[in-house]
Amino acid sequence: MIMKLRLCTALEAVAGGLRVALVEREDFAAGTSSRSTKLVHGGVRYLEKAVKQLDWGQFKLVFEALHERGALLRNVPYMATELPIMTPCYSWWEVPYYWAGMKLYDLVAGSQALHWSYYLPPSKSRAAFPTMSERRADGRRLRGTIVYYDGQFNDARLAVTLACTSALAGATVLNHAAAVSLLKDSQGRVCGAEVADTLQEENAEWARGWPRSPNARAKGTTKVYAKVVINATGPFADGVRSLSAPEGAPMIQPSSGVHVTLPDYYSPEGVGLIVPKTKDGRVVFMLPWLGHTIAGTTDAEAEASMRPQAREEEIQFILDSIAEYLTVRVRRSDVMSAWSGIRPLAVDPHAQDTAGVSRDHVVTVGPDNLVTVAGGKWTTYRLMAEDAIDTAILAGSADSKGANSTETMAQRAGRCATHDLRLIGASGWYPALFTEVAQTYRVPHRPGAIDTRVAQYLVRSYGDRAPEVTQIAEDRKLGHRVVQGYPILEAEVVYACRQEYCETPEDFIARRTRLAFLDKRATLQSLPKIVELMAQEKGWSSKRAKHELQRAADFVATFDSVEHPITEAQATA
């Protein structure tokens, strides 16, 4: 049994022949997993630390991540792509310094290198990135850029795809199902969990609070038994561990990472930029994503929360960091959405701040036989899952009755099941699939309802399943867009409800599509239509529909700073 976030853990287990149940308290990727920088990367900053500090652990992290980057790009090619990223140099010494660093990055990647890094002189740099500043405020002129390659992906869509692939392979997958307590056998070992449906009205408010009173109880729970339970709950891992062992030392140090979404004109399509060193010594990325520009991130201690929200000072820090490198006048009013994600960093007792905490993952087995996964990042998600399942198999084999059973379980450990496993939507995908979608889709009296942009968007989201969405659009006359200016179709609401475990409007706007992360105002404008379509599909009462509309609007309000909230009236103005 696997609790919450690590969806690939379920896939790794079921692909390896194990029986699996996955429970998510809210939706797949409702927390940290949908709030990343959208990069599939080894981590150039970690490599710099490895060299300067002669830190083998950081070097190992970069090496593993670069090789896992290749596996991710292969296994979901329609959703993960290569992205050139430019490092601007405003001092002569920076050119050889960053050139050498990126060449080392290439060498560590070895055969998994996407392309070799290279130097671009100032004129060609500005031609490739027109909004890059020729001269900074301190008078230093652009000396050129070092261009290197990493990957980019759609994090929440990948999480949903992992859930669907796991279910197709035979796993039992439940979202909006919370593990409210752990079950133990006569020897004190964890052997399952008590699970509650958080979509039930009496459990909805209970599910949002964490940590909660020991006396708080959910209604209508079901007991689920398992040989091994894996606690993969991200920043909430310590809370789950406390259900079994309240006295245990913490494994997680939560860290907040804030990003902002800006208009597309901030960066050219298909090219990113990295600010190599901010005022406090961190890096900030500015990347094209889904027709917009995202910039981030910050790194500060935080508390674990299912509804984290950016602070105004964090948003301003990001804007100030990129403003030095751009000719564009960077304005607070250009921020279309802002979000905070809580990183589940594995604790290093010697670290002075969260920037020094390990981004590597840790898998442990407690005295109660509860397997816990802590730390890590999206790029190495498959490796984390492999380690977690190997550990769980060994934990289970130690409890097996009979030598043959123990031997069979132990033999499974170390066997990789997902390294070359293509995810759902990838098998029939090819680069020109969007042309087939655009040519075959027809709506009576509305020729050309799907244009090239919509076709490309659908294929990037669904891969070879895109025609299933367009078929619903044609059959149900749902080819209209849910909101002006975005390629999201009404048919996607129906498809998400039927095929992708979409249970609430929040699931749709944040994780089946990414509208909330792109444009909070457009999201509020789209909600009435989305709720109407979901109510028809799920048979909601008018009271339930009204309740879901208000909950979704409250959720969208978190996509700005606490000090700068957006109201529904402002959104429709």
Image: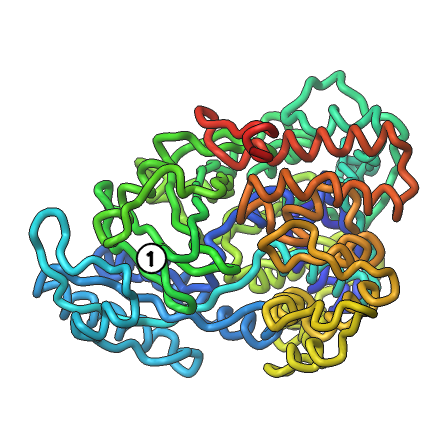
Viewer-closest of 317 and 526: 526
Residue 181 in sight here = no
Q: Count neighbours of disc 1 (C-alpha within 10 A) and say few if under 14, some if 14 to 19, many if 20 or more.
A: many
Residue 503: x, y in percent? 79, 44
Residue 201 sits above or below residue 29 on the image: above
Residue 384: x, y in percent? 57, 58
Left or right placement of residue 267 versus residue 142 in this view = right
Q: SS class of the residue under badge 1?
A: helix
Q: Which residue is mark 1?
A: 46
| Quarter of the figure that contains the C terminus | top right
Task: Name the residue at 63% across, 77% down.
Answer: 420
Residue 209 sits above or below residue 497 on the image: above
The answer to which quarter of the image holds residue 293 is: bottom left
Residue 383: x, y in percent? 56, 64
Residue 15 sits above or below residue 512 on the image: below
Left or right placement of residue 284 versus residue 388 in this view = left
Residue 231: x, y in percent? 66, 44
Task: Name the residue at 67% across, 22% down.
Answer: 212
The three-letter code of the residue at mark 1 reads Tyr
Residue found at the far front of this picture: 445
Task: Name the residue at 79% across, 52% down.
Answer: 501
The answer to which quarter of the image holds residue 304 is: top right
Residue 439 sits above or below residue 541 on the image: below
Task: Name the residue at 87% across, 32% down.
Answer: 221
Viewer-closest of 23 and 325: 325
Left or right placement of residue 314 versus residue 127 in this view = right
Left or right placement of residue 300 versus residue 226 in this view = left
